[in-house]
Image: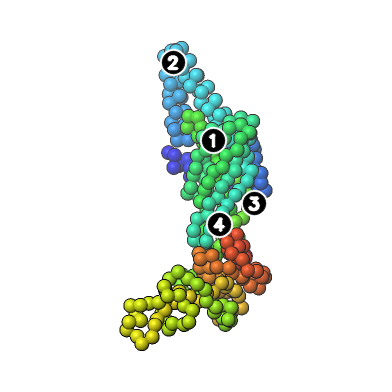
Amino acid sequence: MQEALGRFRRWAERRLPALTRYRRLEPLPILLHRRRIYIAPTGFGVAFTVLLLVMLTGALNYNNNAALMLTCLLGAMTSASMLVAFRSLNGLRLTGVRHGHAIAGEPMVLQLVFTGGDHAHASIHVAMGEQAEAFAVAAHREVIVSLNLPTEHRGWQPLPRIKLWSNWPLGLFHAWSWTHPDHAVLVWPRPEIGGPPPVLPTQDGRQQRRHQGDDIAALRAYRAGDPQRHIAWKHSAHHESLLVKDFEQPEAQEEWRLDWRQLSQLVPEMRIARLARWLGEAEAVGRPTSLWLPNEDIGLGHGRSHYAHCMDALARLP
């Protein structure tokens, strides 16, 4: 029964213009009001209505005033529950959509901000695709509901339609409304799994200079002025001259200057995937990077905000 009613509602939403008027994109905030809230009996509600009709028929046939009174009270309760289901949605506002970052193929966390009207809204469900979350909002208060948005491709991705519904308080009626926020999220490109490191400029003397480290880098011949504590006595016993522990190590490459033009042998999507991988590797070790793209030139920087800036620029490429 419940499945049949669900199919009927979906058919009605496709066929009746009054039910599809809010399929278009809407700017925030979105207010739910009486012209966009729809109500239909649930399977339990239909069965309960049939039971009331049977009770009414029996009470009239046997002239049983007590049974007739009970039937009328239950009928009034049913009508009141329909009003309560409507009020649970009426006046609710979707005031904001917040989101983080996600790589294509991974879910993005959306935070929907709902604000209550002049009365409390109990037992509301928000559904997006196969996901559903329940929440309640006090009068003139705010609540944040988190949902996961599936992503497939990089670039701007519009939000799907979001359904708000409630069976409160008795489950006899199903009240629902659709919202379609005029909002899109930017999905980052998926980095390639493996590949070569970036081609760096020829290292100059500054990049080749050595710095004092804590680990032994090599053994070298003794030079005048070397401290005695650095002499490797055990190794020197097997050589004609003294050997000294060398703690100097080459200085690591400090920065990566990533350039779209250096990957001309790759197709655009592969260029984007490789640049995304290099950015991720640099971010993992805190290496400063710069990024040149056909539509943007991002200077040297490091940290999470710089990484997000570069990934946003890659995601916006045509």
Give the amino acid at mark 1.
Ala
* Mark in the foreground, 3 or 1: 1
Instruction: Report how far apart the C-alphas of labels 3 and 2 lie in the structure.
Output: 53 Å
Q: Say which label, 3 or 2, has the lower sequence index.
A: 2
The CA span between labels 3 and 1 is 24 Å
| Label 2: how many Cα within 10 Å (few below 14, some 14–19, many 20+) | some
* 204 shown above or below 114: below
Residue 20 visible in the snapshot: no
Can residue 3 be seen here?
Answer: yes
Crowdedness near tag 4: few (<14), some (14–19) or many (≥20) residues, C-alpha within 10 Å: some
Q: Assign a secondary structure to mark 2.
A: helix
Circle nearer the viewer, 4 or 2:
4
Q: Are marks 4 and 2 in contact (CB under 8 Å)?
A: no
The amino acid marked with disc number 3 is Asp
Rendered-image quadrant of the C terminus: bottom right
Is tag 3's residue or tag 1's residue first in the polypeptide sequence? 1
Q: Which numbered disc flags the more N-terminal residue, 1 or 4?
A: 4
Numbered mark located on residue 126 in the image: none
The amino acid pointed to by label 2 is Ala
Q: Label 3, on which residue?
A: 182
Tell which tag, 1 or 2, sits nearer the viewer.
1
Distance, label 1 to label 4, CA atoms, is 27 Å
Image quarter hosting the N terminus: top left
Please name whichever residue, 1 or 276, is drawn nearer the observer in this view of the structure: 276
Which residue bears the numbered disc 1? 136
In the shown orientation, is residue 299 left or right of residue 58?
Answer: right
The residue under label 4 is 101
> Which residue position holds label 2?
67
Q: Marks 4/2: CA distance?
A: 61 Å
